[in-house]
Image (spheres, rainbow, N blue to C red):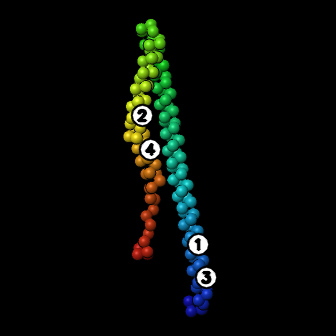
Amino acid sequence: MADKTFHGNVTEIISIARSYVNARIELWKLSLLEKASLAGAFFLSSVIFVLIIAFCLLFVSLAFAIWYGQKTGDFALGFLITAGFYVIIGIIFLLAKNYLIAGPVIKNLSSIICKDDEPEQSLDDE
């Protein structure tokens, strides 16, 4: 270390600092990519789940309306009852949208985005 000059030490420190900053930037990029991927996967799986439930409800509704229409002889009443059921469900969702939809979505996304993979090491630990 006696053969190094002050200029050489400063140059080495600057080089190490640049390497550290570049490594941190790469870490942030990878962390952002991971969080965006997890959020995208959450949204995609949620959309697929909602579509599956929607198709199931569609076919169950059609089956009920046709069954009720055959039993009573009035298909229009069967479809009207089904539509009334969906109006009631729609009103319930409208009144409780923050509790039923927004709250769980925000909770899941915040857990994905705010999860801390590696705790920062303090300088005291080294």
Residue that mark 2 sits on? 94
Q: Is residue 67 visible?
A: no
Give the mark nearest the N terminus, 1 or 4. 1
Amino acid type at image mark 2: Leu
Give the mark nearest the N terminus, 3 or 4. 3
CB atoms of marks 3 and 4 within 8 Å: no
**In the depicted view, which residue is nearer to us: 82 or 9?**
82
Give the CA distance from mark 1 to mark 4.
38 Å
CB atoms of marks 3 and 2 within 8 Å: no
Residue ID at (41%, 33%): 93
**In the depicted view, which residue is nearer to us: 22 or 92?**
92
Disc 3 versus disc 2: nearer the observer? 2
- Name the element at disc 2: helix
- Name the element at disc 1: helix
Give the CA distance from mark 2 to mark 4.
16 Å
Residue ID at (57%, 63%): 26
Give the mark nearest the N terminus, 3 or 2. 3
Give the mark nearest the N terminus, 1 or 3. 3
- Name the element at disc 4: helix
Give the CA distance from mark 3 to mark 2.
63 Å
Residue that mark 4 sits on? 105
Q: Which mark is residue 19?
A: 1
